[in-house]
Amino acid sequence: MQINPGLSTKNANTWCPSCTNFSLLASVKIAISSLIKKGIKKKDFAMVTGIGCHGKIFDYLNISGVYGLHGRTIPTAHGITLGNPNLKVLVFAGDGDSYAEGMEHFIHAFRNNPNITLIVHDNRDFSLTGGQPSPTTQKGYKSKVTPKGEEKIPFNPIKIALACGGGFIARCNAKDIKHTAKIIEKAINYNGFSFIEVIQNCQIFNTELNDIDSKMYKVNNSNIKKAYSLADEWDYNSKNKRIPIGIIYSKKII
């Protein structure tokens, strides 16, 4: 799929070399390009970003938006939809951004169900500020603030989303650009709050779980009981368990 040239900017990219944010940016551009080709105008897209490595996507994706506060991306995006319900609003946030400071907004977004697509860049640590553990960091991870290893078990955001009544819940692999682009396009087309967690590597911090691609397999599910079963397959702590990616649950297949 050819990327619409109008989606790129001239800003110098400061992500680390080989960061999987490059891949995710490509997936986003492919998804939006496909929707533009199908008749949606570029001006009908907007974005909100949080604070973190992910937030720099604001400088590299040429659509309107707000560079928001840490943990406050979802309410900012909700405000945009209230001002203009016709916009396709994308939220880019990190695992700390969404599941720590922003957890209250994450939970209530499923209940409020605004027409927003939340894309969580989950590299399982706070990379921009030095690699501190996030809510999805595995037990035993050593950092400057956990020199003896992380003692807490990680959250499972997919299970939280299901428990909150999410209508579109997906997980993607940042390295799989085409598949991720397809899921993002489907999420944008979903009428309501859609949630995509993107599993990605950090080249600097918490590299222990970077080689889990071989455990991933693709799903496309609309059965709620099956969704809970899929959510249980990976606990964000294991290197050996299978990891379903794709649409974990959608009230209707798009």
Image (spheres, rainbow, N blue to C red):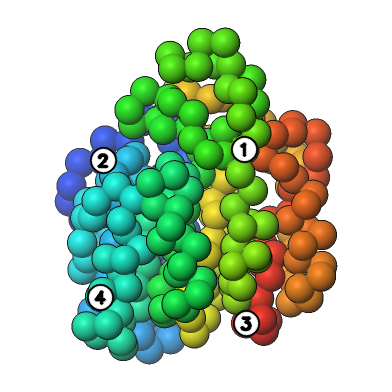
The answer to whether 171 appears left or right of 224 in the picture is left
Which residue is drawn at the image coordinates 47% and 41% (left, top)?
20
Mark 3 vs mark 2: give the one in front: 3
Secondary element under disc 1, as helix, strand or loop, is: loop
How far across and how far down the image is residue 153, in percent?
65, 34
Q: Is residue 193 above or below residue 139?
A: below
Sequence order check: which comes first, mark 2 or mark 4?
Answer: 2
- Work out whether residue 37 or residue 22 is closer to the camera in this orientation and state it: 22
Left or right of 217, for residue 49 = left
Write down the residue under mark 3. Answer: 254
What residue type is disc 4 on? Ile
Residue reaching furthest left? 10
Read off the residue under disc 2. 13
Q: Nearer the viewer, residue 252 or 83?
A: 83
Choose the circle earlier in sequence order: 4 or 1. 4
Where in the figure is residue 10, as x and y percent of width and height?
Answer: 17, 51
Quadrant location of the C terminus? bottom right
Task: Answer yes or no: is residue 196 visible.
Answer: yes
Q: Secondary structure at mark 2?
A: loop
The residue where tag 1 is placed is 154
Mark 1 Cα shell of 10 Å, populated few (<14), some (14-19), many (≥20)? some
- Residue 80 circle label: 4
Outermost residue on the top side: it is 148
- Residue in the foreground of this view, choosing between 181 and 222: 222
Image coordinates of residue 232 in percent, x first then y, are: 78, 52
How far is the residue under mark 1 from the one under mark 3? Answer: 31 Å
Q: Is residue 170 above or below residue 141?
A: below
Pick whichever, 118 or 134, lies toward us. 134
Badge 3 marks a residue whose secondary structure is loop
Foreground mark, 2 or 4, reads 4
**In the visual, does 172 lie left or right of 71?**
right
Which of disc 3 and disc 1 is earlier in sequence?
Answer: 1
